[in-house]
Amino acid sequence: MPNKTTPNFNSVFEQEVYRGLTDFPKHLSSKYFYDAVGDKLFQEIMKLPEYYLTNSELEILQDHKEAIAGHFSRGKATFNLIELGAGDGSKTRILLNYLQQKNTSFQYVPIDISTHILNELTNSLNSEFPGLAVKPVQGTYFESLEAICQMDKNRKVILFLGSNIGNLLHPQAVDFLVQVQKLMSSDDLFLVGFDQKKDPQKILDAYNDPGGVTEAFNKNILTRINRELGGDFNGNNFRHWEVYDPESGTAKSYLVSLKAHDVYIRSLDLKVTFKAWETIHTEISQKYDDDVVSWLARKAGLEIVEAFSDRRKLFKNYLFRKF
């Protein structure tokens, strides 16, 4: 059994690891997949033939950039193109290039929690798109959005790409959409990527590649605990496992303990006992259809302006406005 004395936490990471591994059933947040190693692994995942999501959304933005940009640039007033979790901006560059070619009046406002990522992105964009107005904002999504609203009164076009909303169950997704909606004006727009329901096997394959890259990505959270918190996890004691429920559209990732064993985490002074076949739930990847997205939008006070799909109907980007 885990220790009963709650330690003093030095970081949110410590606190969430402690709570997740002393809870039943055990769980860890997928946001902790991402460090220098995890970022590289995810870049590899995006290149895998099984992982259709990235190329599908790139195809949408390439095929529909004129229609999407037409919605963005309605009227002549300058607008802020705000991206939540901008990362390397690989997909957004398609839109930036098109908007700049059309001499559209806008400034790009990437939001990310990582100053390092924002600096790299800004330098890259300044080199690739001379004259592009880039105003990076470091921080969390909603605090940054609120600050932007107070900063100027320009119309807002908000991007949330990559099916990141799929990491939230429906009640959490509604809460997220509501928070964005409250910071929108009536003429603002919100473009969100939603992975679609499809052949269950295709979804399972996307999160369980034969080369084991996704498995290494899932297990990277254990490596992070070892490195940053003094844990002694052995990744070989766990199996990466993916399940998908086609009724609810919920894909879940787990680490399954292959044998009974204990793990000690030094910074938490915590011994965690695992039974054989016990799980750590690490990620949710929600899938959608038009009815579900319409329901989420209504619950959040949004309406769909238009939806854009790739040619194989695997992924969609929905454009929302406030009621």
Image (cartoon, rainbow, N blue to C red):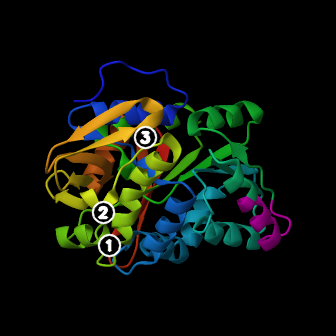
Q: Is residue 285 left or right of residue 200?
A: right
> What residue range appears in magenta?
120-132
Q: Is residue 237 left or right of residue 145?
A: left
**How far from the left and from the top, in percent, is residue 48?**
40, 78
Q: Nearer the viewer, residue 2 or 133?
A: 2
Q: Residue at x 48, y 33 (%)?
A: 267
Q: Quadrant of the C terminus?
A: top left
Residue mark closest to the camera, 2 vs 3: 2
| Label located before the other in sequence (1 or 2) | 2
Q: Which residue is mark 3?
A: 302
Q: Residue furthest top?
A: 5
**How far from the left and from the top, in percent, is residue 71?**
58, 59
| Label located before the other in sequence (1 or 3) | 3
Residue type, label 1: Lys
> Is residue 256 shown above or below 49?
above
Residue mark closest to the camera, 1 vs 3: 1
Residue type, label 2: Gln
Residue 313 badge: 1
Q: Which residue is mark 2?
A: 196
Q: Measure how far apart labels 1 and 3 are at the Cα level.
A: 23 Å
Q: Quadrant of residue 207?
A: bottom left
